[in-house]
Image (cartoon, helix red, strand yellow):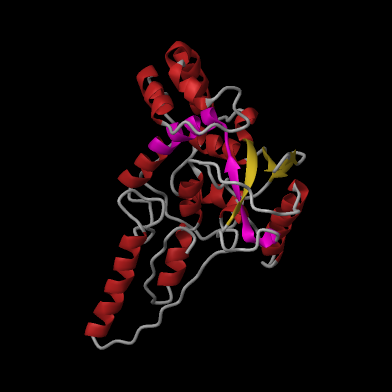
Amino acid sequence: ILLPLPPSSLSADDFVNHFEKKVDDIRSSFAKSNDTAGPAHTALPCALTSFSPLSPDEISRLVTAGRPTTCPLDPIPSSLLQTISGDLLPYLTSLINSSLTAGYVPSVFKRARVAPLLKKPTLDPSDVNNYRPVSLLSFLSKTLERAVLGQLSCYLSQNDLLDPNQSGFKTGHSTETALLCVTEALRTAKANSLSSALILLDLSAAFDTVNHQILLSTHSELGISGAAHAWIASYLTGRSYQVAWRESVSAPHALTTGVPQGSVLGPLLFSLYTKSLGSVISSHGLSYHCYGDD
């Protein structure tokens, strides 16, 4: 359902300037550091060195099971692509498997059309601060992401590498399970005559400020190497976006930080990026629970 755009005198360039300035201001508020430096980690017995090629049947299921959301960057409507996917299956299989085995994401799959979304309907639509950037990505690029998501999630789950205290972006978890966990911790503390202090942390522009070098270093620490690591590095680098607002579209801009909001892989990559936060909190003798960027 497409909702009518709110009344506003803003332009596409206004959103570009705001989104980029917000990220720059947040990044500049931190002290300069070595992006690739990190604590020493014990070598893991497990490793993910490459993504396995998929069979034509697996590719077909990925294409037809995806929600047919058409992006302005799609050459044809995604619903039509799903309808004729049987005829195109040899080419789609070759395209996706070539990317997986070579550890390379085609540049055409790294373009996004950003649609500014009003955070709440009650907010002032003339204030650029009240919008968040949501990336519209081509249907095939998201299909490729799903191929990687399945294998990456399986590797992380089988080797118990995900933060058990992160309820966001996880099957079988929700705001309800997160609330139950925190409430039960408070109830248990009260039953044991202990005092409790609840500290709430919400990260600003969380997805947009992800540092690529730190994220890739985290993947290496989790045993992801070789062509699999190269694929993720290729996915992150060389990305670009254009902001579309009303009848105007901005010029293309390079995206050097962050993971796209609206992507398939973005939530999982963000969860891995913030995984070390749990050990920092625990080192101070505190319990914690995360949901998304909260």
Q: Horizontal and vertical percent for residue 150? A: 39, 36
Q: Could you say which is closer to the camera, residue 248 or residue 230?
A: 248
Q: Main secondary structure of the magenta part?
A: helix
Quarter where residue 251 is shown: top right
Does residue 53 sit above or below 84 in this rendering?
below
In the image, what residue occupies the spot 55% across and 64% down? Answer: 203
Question: Which residue occupies the extreme left position in the image?
Answer: 191
In the image, what residue occupies the spot 72% across and 56% down? Answer: 18
Quarter where residue 209 is shown: bottom right
Q: Horizontal and vertical percent for residue 54? A: 40, 23
Q: How many marks?
A: 0
In the image, what residue occupies the spot 57% across and 63% down? Answer: 122
User: Does the magenta-highlighted stretch encompass residue 81?
Assistant: no
Does residue 198 sit above or below 124 in this rendering?
below
Is residue 49 visible to the viewer in this orientation of the structure?
no
131 on left or right of 165: right
Which region of the structure is painted magenta?
Answer: 127-150
Is residue 146 visible to the viewer in this orientation of the structure?
yes
83 on left or right of 115: left
Q: Horizontal and vertical percent for residue 11? A: 76, 49
Q: Horizontal and vertical percent for residue 160? A: 33, 50
Quarter where residue 183 is shown: bottom left
User: Does the magenta-highlighted stretch encompass residue 129?
Assistant: yes
